[in-house]
């Protein structure tokens, strides 16, 4: 009898990259040429149930009948169709937050933000997060589990379907800034991004995809080594070891000095600009002196700094930096030669802003 760990896990068909899907067909004696139509039906058309599609050649039709949907067997695939438990629009109508239930009942959040003629999805990479940043609702709930590649892809497909149903053309940008730390779930995230950026599928260009990390140094160096073509965003929040560690506990494991060294290596290896994120907390890290310290710390790095005024969360009592102070902070950075943007506050009234995401089973 195999032990529970030896029983292969049943996989989602959305976990498969194009070449893995092709391989599955070959193993079933089907010409790999047929994989393209199956792939584009799954990813480009974003159909929910393959069984309802009738225009495949008979061997593929048979493969679908035999391989898909038989939930009890590990040799079969299931289709990643996260179930929306809630779909909440912000009062300005520009942000929509989906609470999605995964196949094991776990809930995660996906946010779609609309700007004139372009939509950005903000997806989760883990249920909860192990990094414990004090001001972040996801950090406050703790770590639940990693998401599989198909569960990350499934969120993008859900957002695509929702946009198309509302008469829009679909997503233009993707940010991995929902629940979780992407580089703590490196392999699944990179497989998901391979799938999402495939030109015959969802086709989101790599330069339109941002991977945001709290500073998992080995992950940053691995991205550089593997020449991953995505944008890197690094959440900084403090410009001295002490100040940063007070907000970002994981900074004790990967100190600021190592993080900045890794950013320099990343910049030198890839030639890419790095986006730094700085959550502005009134009286904590929002004075002109803090901005000056950032400028010294990042000297020589091709950097853009995104300033995110703190969004309220239940477990943190800090308050938001007001507009005037945020502008003054930005001016110091710009005078030192660092382009900087104050992030528009989006979706705050439905708790869909940065750092406000957490799983709630019974949303209001
Ligand atoms: N774990 C990754 C990505 C998800 S968090 C990371 O930390 O980068 C996405 C962004 O939201 C990060 O820049 C984070 O610092 C920011 N954030 C978290 N909580 C916030 C809050 N309460 N208000 C404003 N920004 C917040
Ligand atoms: Fe995790 Fe990012 Fe939140 Fe920190 S800010 S707890 S790393 S999700």
Image: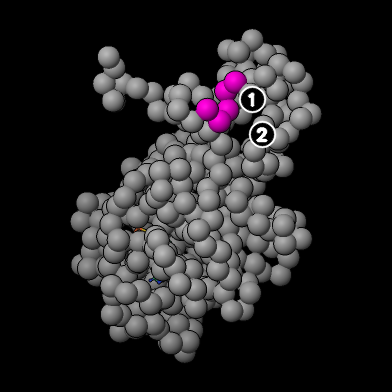
Is 285 placed left or right of 301 in the picture?
Answer: left
Which residue is at a point 64% across and 25% down the rendered structure image?
Answer: 64
Q: Residue 123 at what x, y percent from top left?
A: 50, 54
Which residue is at a point 28% across and 25% down the rendered structure image?
Answer: 4
Determine whether 136 is above or below 252 in the image.
below
**What type of secondary structure mainly makes up the magenta span?**
loop
Which residue is at a point 64% across and 42% down the rendered structure image?
Answer: 48
| Magenta-span inclusion, residue 67 | yes
What is the number of the mark on residue 253? none
How busy is the neighbourhood of tag 2: few (under 14 within 10 Å), some, or many (20 plus)?
some
Q: Secondary structure at mark 1?
A: helix
Q: Nearer the viewer, residue 250 or 333?
A: 250
Q: Residue 122 at what x, y percent from top left?
A: 53, 58
Q: Nearer the viewer, residue 328 or 347?
A: 347
Q: Where is mark 2, residue-wise?
A: 50
Q: Where is mark 1, residue-wise?
A: 64
Give the residues drawn in magenta, as a range: 66-70
Q: Residue 107 at what x, y percent from top left?
A: 42, 54
Is 229 placed left or right of 6 in the picture?
Answer: right
Q: Check contact, mark 1 vs mark 2: CB within 8 A.
A: yes
Dot placed on the residue nearer the N-terminal end, 1 or 2? 2
Which residue is at a point 72% across and 57% down the rendered structure image?
Answer: 165
Quadrant where the N terminus lies? Answer: top left
Q: Residue 207 at what x, y percent from top left?
A: 61, 50
């Amino acid at each position: 009898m195999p032990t529970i760990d030896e029983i292969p896990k049943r996989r989602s068909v959305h976990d498969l990259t194009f070449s893995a899907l092709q391989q599955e067909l070959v193993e079933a004696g089907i010409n790999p040429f047929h994989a393209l139509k199956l792939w584009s039906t799954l990813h480009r058309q974003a159909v929910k149930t393959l069984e309802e599609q009738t225009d495949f050649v008979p061997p593929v039709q048979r493969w679908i009948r035999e391989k898909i949907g038989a939930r009890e067997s590990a040799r079969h695939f299931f289709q990643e169709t996260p179930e929306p438990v809630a779909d909440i629009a912000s009062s300005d109508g520009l942000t929509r937050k989906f609470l999605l239930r995964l196949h094991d009942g776990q809930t995660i959040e996906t946010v779609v933000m609309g700007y004139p003629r372009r939509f950005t999805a903000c997806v989760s990479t883990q249920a909860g997060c192990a990094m414990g940043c004090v001001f972040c609702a996801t950090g406050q709930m703790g770590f639940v589990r990693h998401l599989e590649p198909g569960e990350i892809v499934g969120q993008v497909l859900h957002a695509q379907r929702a946009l198309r149903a509302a008469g829009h053309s679909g997503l233009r940008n993707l940010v991995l800034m929902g629940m979780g730390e992407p580089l703590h779930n490196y392999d699944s995230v990179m497989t998901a991004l391979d799938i999402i950026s495939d030109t015959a599928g969802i086709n989101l260009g790599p330069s339109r995809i941002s991977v945001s990390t709290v500073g998992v140094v080995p992950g940053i160096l691995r991205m550089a080594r593997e020449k991953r073509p995505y944008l890197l965003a690094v959440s900084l929040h403090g410009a001295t070891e002490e100040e940063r560690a007070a907000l970002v506990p994981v900074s004790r494991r990967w100190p600021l000095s190592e993080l900045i060294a890794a950013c320099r290596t990343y910049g030198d290896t890839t030639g890419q600009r790095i986006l730094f994120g700085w959550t502005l907390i009134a009286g904590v890290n929002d004075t002109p002196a803090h901005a000056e310290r950032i400028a010294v710390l990042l000297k020589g790095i091709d950097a853009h700094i995104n300033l995110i005024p703190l969004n309220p969360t239940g477990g943190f009592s800090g308050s938001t930096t007001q507009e005037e102070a945020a502008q003054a902070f930005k001016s110091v950075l710009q005078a030192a030669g660092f382009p900087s943007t104050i992030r528009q506050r989006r979706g705050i009234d439905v708790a869909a802003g940065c750092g406000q995401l957490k799983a709630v089973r019974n949303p209001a």
